[in-house]
Image: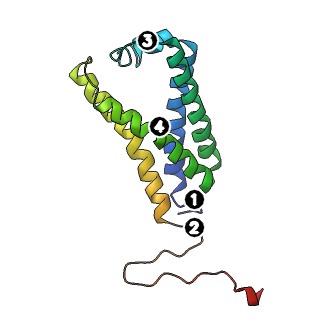
Amino acid sequence: MTELGAPRAPARLVLGLLAVVQGVDGFYALLAPRSFYEDFPAGRGWVEALPAYSEHLVRDVGGLFLATAVVLGAAAIWLERRLVLVALVSFLAFSIPHTTYHLFNLGGISTGDAIAEAVLLLLTVVAPVALLVAMLMHRPGRACFRAGSPPARSRRRSPSSR
């Protein structure tokens, strides 16, 4: 563990992958909104299965994807605890409702595509939640303790000892 509160390599991997996916999807939606609507992902038409098309909405979603990509990417690069926590919570504020909506609206696509969509979307919730839990379970600067043993005393100085 580091001051981050989670292993650095897995944290960087989760944040980096989420940033790349959000960035690629964001640029795609911004630069080719009609294609994003009709073909995403890779010609499968998952977005088109939930009509109706709105260029404005698709471009706005693309911008929001890029915004989350920036924050996730910055968190992956710097791995500063507060930045990572904010990036994860803000991404989950998007991904939990997004995943929930799609899990209840899988009509219009094949069974294989529905399974693939559900699995991929669940990963966008499970991976950041796992990283967030790992970070919150370990508080930097505080000794970890086992069940039944008392927590370490605070290292702060009393006002009279300053």
Residue at point 70%, 84% (across, down): 157
From the viewer's perspective, is residue 95 above or below residue 141? above
| Residue assigned mark 4 | 94
In the rendered picture of this protein, how many numbered marks are placed on residues? Answer: 4
| Residue assigned mark 2 | 140
From the viewer's perspective, is residue 29 above or below residue 151? above
Image position, residue 68 (x, y; %): 56, 35
The answer for how far apart the CA atoms under marks 2 and 3 are is 47 Å
The answer for how far apart the CA atoms under marks 1 and 4 are is 23 Å
Q: Which mark is residue 53?
A: 3
Q: Earlier in the sequence, mark 1 or mark 2?
A: 1
- Residue positioned most to the left: 111
Residue at point 47%, 13% (across, down): 54
**Pointers 1 and 3 in contact (CB under 8 A)?**
no
| Residue assigned mark 1 | 4
Image position, residue 45 (x, y; %): 36, 14
- Residue positioned most to the right: 162
Q: Earlier in the sequence, mark 1 or mark 3?
A: 1
Amino acid type of the residue that numbered disc 3 sits on in the rendered structure: Tyr
In the picture, measured across the screen, residue 37 lies left or right of residue 15, that is: left
